[in-house]
Image (cartoon, rainbow, N blue to C red):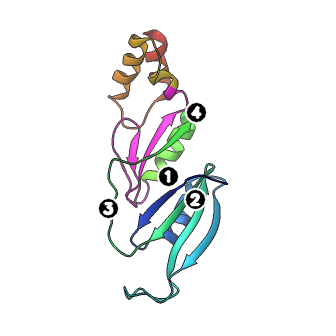
Protein backbone atom coordinates (compact mmCIF):
# COMPACT_ATOMS: atom_id res chain seq x y z
CA UNK A 1 0.00 0.00 0.00
CA UNK A 2 1.24 3.48 -0.87
CA UNK A 3 1.98 5.74 2.06
CA UNK A 4 1.44 8.97 0.11
CA UNK A 5 0.58 10.14 -3.39
CA UNK A 6 -0.09 13.48 -5.04
CA UNK A 7 -3.38 15.15 -5.82
CA UNK A 8 -3.49 17.51 -8.78
CA UNK A 9 -6.31 20.05 -8.43
CA UNK A 10 -8.04 20.94 -11.65
CA UNK A 11 -10.97 23.25 -12.10
CA UNK A 12 -12.85 20.81 -14.34
CA UNK A 13 -10.27 19.08 -16.58
CA UNK A 14 -9.54 15.79 -14.75
CA UNK A 15 -11.02 13.53 -17.46
CA UNK A 16 -9.18 15.47 -20.20
CA UNK A 17 -5.95 15.26 -18.18
CA UNK A 18 -6.31 11.46 -17.94
CA UNK A 19 -6.55 11.18 -21.74
CA UNK A 20 -3.63 13.56 -22.27
CA UNK A 21 -1.24 11.92 -19.79
CA UNK A 22 -2.20 8.45 -21.06
CA UNK A 23 -1.16 9.61 -24.57
CA UNK A 24 2.15 11.04 -23.29
CA UNK A 25 3.34 8.29 -20.95
CA UNK A 26 3.30 4.70 -22.21
CA UNK A 27 1.90 2.23 -19.73
CA UNK A 28 -0.19 4.79 -17.84
CA UNK A 29 -2.82 2.95 -15.85
CA UNK A 30 -6.22 4.51 -15.41
CA UNK A 31 -7.84 3.71 -12.09
CA UNK A 32 -11.18 4.49 -10.57
CA UNK A 33 -13.24 7.62 -11.09
CA UNK A 34 -15.59 9.16 -8.55
CA UNK A 35 -18.45 11.49 -9.35
CA UNK A 36 -20.10 14.47 -7.72
CA UNK A 37 -23.36 13.79 -5.92
CA UNK A 38 -25.66 16.43 -4.56
CA UNK A 39 -23.62 19.40 -3.39
CA UNK A 40 -24.08 22.98 -2.19
CA UNK A 41 -21.89 24.40 -4.98
CA UNK A 42 -24.34 23.72 -7.79
CA UNK A 43 -21.96 21.35 -9.58
CA UNK A 44 -23.84 19.02 -11.88
CA UNK A 45 -24.51 15.70 -10.16
CA UNK A 46 -22.66 12.91 -11.98
CA UNK A 47 -19.78 15.16 -13.07
CA UNK A 48 -16.28 13.72 -12.56
CA UNK A 49 -14.96 14.49 -9.07
CA UNK A 50 -11.72 12.45 -9.07
CA UNK A 51 -9.76 10.26 -11.42
CA UNK A 52 -6.88 8.05 -10.34
CA UNK A 53 -4.00 7.33 -12.70
CA UNK A 54 -0.54 5.82 -12.39
CA UNK A 55 2.16 7.47 -14.52
CA UNK A 56 5.59 5.81 -14.66
CA UNK A 57 4.73 3.94 -11.45
CA UNK A 58 3.58 7.07 -9.59
CA UNK A 59 -0.05 7.15 -8.49
CA UNK A 60 -1.83 10.48 -8.84
CA UNK A 61 -5.34 11.65 -8.11
CA UNK A 62 -6.78 14.29 -10.41
CA UNK A 63 -9.49 16.33 -8.71
CA UNK A 64 -12.17 18.52 -10.29
CA UNK A 65 -12.67 21.12 -7.60
CA UNK A 66 -14.61 23.57 -9.81
CA UNK A 67 -12.68 26.42 -8.23
CA UNK A 68 -9.71 28.02 -9.97
CA UNK A 69 -6.54 27.01 -8.12
CA UNK A 70 -3.59 27.96 -10.31
CA UNK A 71 -0.45 25.86 -10.31
CA UNK A 72 2.86 27.54 -9.52
CA UNK A 73 6.58 26.87 -9.82
CA UNK A 74 6.99 25.42 -6.34
CA UNK A 75 5.87 21.91 -7.33
CA UNK A 76 6.92 19.90 -10.39
CA UNK A 77 7.16 16.32 -11.54
CA UNK A 78 10.59 15.01 -12.53
CA UNK A 79 10.93 12.52 -15.38
CA UNK A 80 14.44 11.01 -15.54
CA UNK A 81 15.27 9.90 -19.10
CA UNK A 82 17.96 7.46 -20.23
CA UNK A 83 18.21 8.76 -23.81
CA UNK A 84 17.95 12.02 -25.71
CA UNK A 85 15.16 10.45 -27.74
CA UNK A 86 13.16 10.03 -24.51
CA UNK A 87 13.77 13.65 -23.53
CA UNK A 88 12.77 14.84 -27.01
CA UNK A 89 9.63 12.69 -26.99
CA UNK A 90 8.35 13.86 -23.59
CA UNK A 91 9.28 17.45 -24.38
CA UNK A 92 7.35 17.43 -27.65
CA UNK A 93 4.27 15.74 -26.19
CA UNK A 94 4.09 17.74 -22.96
CA UNK A 95 4.49 21.10 -24.73
CA UNK A 96 1.89 20.23 -27.39
CA UNK A 97 -1.48 21.94 -27.45
CA UNK A 98 -0.49 25.02 -25.47
CA UNK A 99 2.33 23.82 -23.23
CA UNK A 100 5.51 25.89 -23.09
CA UNK A 101 9.20 25.41 -22.42
CA UNK A 102 10.72 27.25 -19.50
CA UNK A 103 14.45 26.68 -18.86
CA UNK A 104 16.89 24.12 -17.49
CA UNK A 105 14.73 21.15 -18.48
CA UNK A 106 11.50 22.61 -17.09
CA UNK A 107 8.28 22.96 -19.02
CA UNK A 108 4.63 23.70 -18.33
CA UNK A 109 2.00 21.50 -19.95
CA UNK A 110 -1.28 22.81 -21.35
CA UNK A 111 -2.97 22.33 -17.96
CA UNK A 112 -0.35 24.38 -16.12
CA UNK A 113 1.42 21.42 -14.49
CA UNK A 114 5.22 21.84 -14.25
CA UNK A 115 7.56 19.06 -15.38
CA UNK A 116 11.33 18.59 -15.28
CA UNK A 117 12.48 16.38 -18.14
CA UNK A 118 16.02 15.44 -17.16
CA UNK A 119 18.78 12.95 -17.97
CA UNK A 120 18.70 9.93 -15.65
CA UNK A 121 22.29 10.76 -14.62
CA UNK A 122 21.49 14.33 -13.59
CA UNK A 123 21.26 13.54 -9.86
CA UNK A 124 24.67 11.84 -10.02
CA UNK A 125 26.19 14.86 -11.79
CA UNK A 126 24.46 17.38 -9.52
CA UNK A 127 25.51 15.66 -6.29
CA UNK A 128 29.10 14.94 -7.32
CA UNK A 129 31.70 15.73 -4.68
CA UNK A 130 33.87 17.05 -7.50
CA UNK A 131 32.94 20.74 -7.39
CA UNK A 132 34.40 21.52 -10.84
CA UNK A 133 32.37 18.74 -12.51
CA UNK A 134 29.17 19.76 -10.75
CA UNK A 135 29.64 23.42 -11.65
CA UNK A 136 30.45 22.57 -15.27
CA UNK A 137 27.16 20.66 -15.61
CA UNK A 138 25.17 23.41 -13.95
CA UNK A 139 26.82 26.08 -16.12
CA UNK A 140 25.96 24.12 -19.27
CA UNK A 141 22.39 23.48 -18.07
CA UNK A 142 21.73 27.21 -17.57
CA UNK A 143 22.19 27.68 -21.35
CA UNK A 144 19.36 25.27 -22.22
CA UNK A 145 15.62 24.97 -22.22
CA UNK A 146 15.30 21.32 -23.28
CA UNK A 147 18.29 19.47 -21.85
CA UNK A 148 20.92 17.90 -24.12
CA UNK A 149 22.39 14.75 -22.55
CA UNK A 150 25.56 14.75 -24.70
CA UNK A 151 26.45 18.35 -23.82
CA UNK A 152 25.77 17.85 -20.10
CA UNK A 153 27.72 14.59 -19.98
CA UNK A 154 30.64 16.20 -21.88
CA UNK A 155 30.63 19.11 -19.42
CA UNK A 156 30.81 16.65 -16.51
CA UNK A 157 33.41 14.34 -18.07
CA UNK A 158 35.69 17.14 -19.29
CA UNK A 159 35.74 19.24 -16.12
Secondary structure type for disc 1:
helix
At label 4, counting other C-alpha atoms closer than 10 Å, the crowd grade (few under 14, some 14-19, many 20 or more) is some
Q: CA gap, disc 3 to disc 4?
A: 32 Å
Label 3 vs label 4, nearer the camera: 3
* N-term mark: 4 or 1: 4
Q: Quadrant of the N terminus?
A: bottom right
At label 3, counting other C-alpha atoms closer than 10 Å, the crowd grade (few under 14, some 14-19, many 20 or more) is few
Residue at 40% over, 59% down: 110
Q: Is residue 21 depicted above or below 104 in this figure? A: below
Kindly check if marks 1 and 2 are in contact, taking CB atoms under 8 A apart as contact: yes
Residue at 43% over, 87% down: 39
Residue 84, given in percent of the width and then of the height, sits at 54, 34
At label 1, counting other C-alpha atoms closer than 10 Å, the crowd grade (few under 14, some 14-19, many 20 or more) is some
User: Which residue is under mark 1?
Assistant: 93
Q: What stretch is highlighted in magenta?
A: 96-123
Residue 19, given in percent of the width and then of the height, sits at 55, 66
* N-term mark: 3 or 4: 3
* Circle on res. 83: 4
* N-term mark: 1 or 2: 2
* Circle on res. 23: 2
User: Which residue is under mark 3?
Assistant: 70
Secondary structure type for disc 4:
loop
Label 1 vs label 3, nearer the camera: 3
Q: CA gap, disc 2 to disc 3?
A: 23 Å
* N-term mark: 2 or 3: 2
Amino acid sequence: MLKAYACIWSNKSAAEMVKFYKSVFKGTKVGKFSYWGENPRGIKEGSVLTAHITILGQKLMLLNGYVEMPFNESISFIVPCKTQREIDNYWKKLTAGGGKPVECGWLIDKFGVRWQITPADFDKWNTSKNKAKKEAVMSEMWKMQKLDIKKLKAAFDNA
